[in-house]
Image (spheres, rainbow, N blue to C red):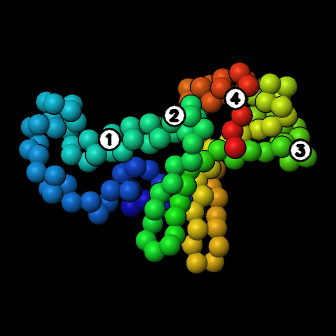
Amino acid sequence: MNYKTGYCFNCHDLFENFKFSSLGIKKEVFYYKYHCKRVEDMVVQVFLFFMYLVLIDIIENNITFVLPLKGARHAMIHVKVFDGDQFQKMYAGGKFMGIDFLSSLFRGYQLFFSYNYREGEREKPIYINNKMKEIFYGYINSGKEYY
């Protein structure tokens, strides 16, 4: 059994309680049409593609993706800006090494997941793979500004 610590999880953990039988699709269809051996794999692939599209949309179009939650709570995925002394300390520590600091006007950018709860608000950084990081840094180095 895998015990979840911190806020790390994998996609299969998200769908532990999902009722796959409610999809109403036969197993043969998953294998031949979607090239998946298990129903769970197809659901995870759809979710991962959805998250990829959301992150690319945020990077390309400078948007904030808002997720409504129960009650008056909400969560969002957005780009956070680091500048001034905070940027200098992070850059000196090895962060934002793919960013040309002249093109970015001495600003660093990172994707964040923010959510509110009873006691306040929290932010968690989103780590992206190298291919998506190249796209993100390419936009920054071409002079795109995020807010």
Q: Is residue 131 visible?
A: yes
Cα separation, mark 3 vs mark 1, equals 40 Å
Cα separation, mark 1 vs mark 2, equals 15 Å
Disc 3 versus disc 4: nearer the observer: 4
Quarter of the image for the C terminus: give it. Answer: top right
Q: Position of residue 83 (x, y in %)?
A: 83, 43
Instruction: Give the secondary structure at mark 2.
Output: helix
Q: Earlier in the sequence, mark 3 or mark 1?
A: 1
- In terms of depth relative to the viewer, which is nearer, 9 or 77? 77
The disc labelled 1 sits on which kind of residue?
Answer: Val
Lateral position of residue 108 relative to residue 66, left or right: right
What residue did someone put label 3 on?
84
Q: Earlier in the sequence, mark 3 or mark 2?
A: 2
Cα separation, mark 1 vs mark 4, equals 30 Å
Residue 46 got which mark? Answer: 1
Q: Quadrant of residue 29?
A: top left
What residue did someone put label 4 on?
144
**Label 3 neighbour load within 10 Å: few <14, some 14-19, many 20+:** few
Instruction: Give the secondary structure at mark 1.
Output: helix
The disc labelled 4 sits on which kind of residue?
Answer: Lys
Q: Earlier in the sequence, mark 2 or mark 4?
A: 2
Q: Earlier in the sequence, mark 1 or mark 2?
A: 1
The disc labelled 2 sits on which kind of residue?
Answer: Ile
The disc labelled 3 sits on which kind of residue?
Answer: Gly
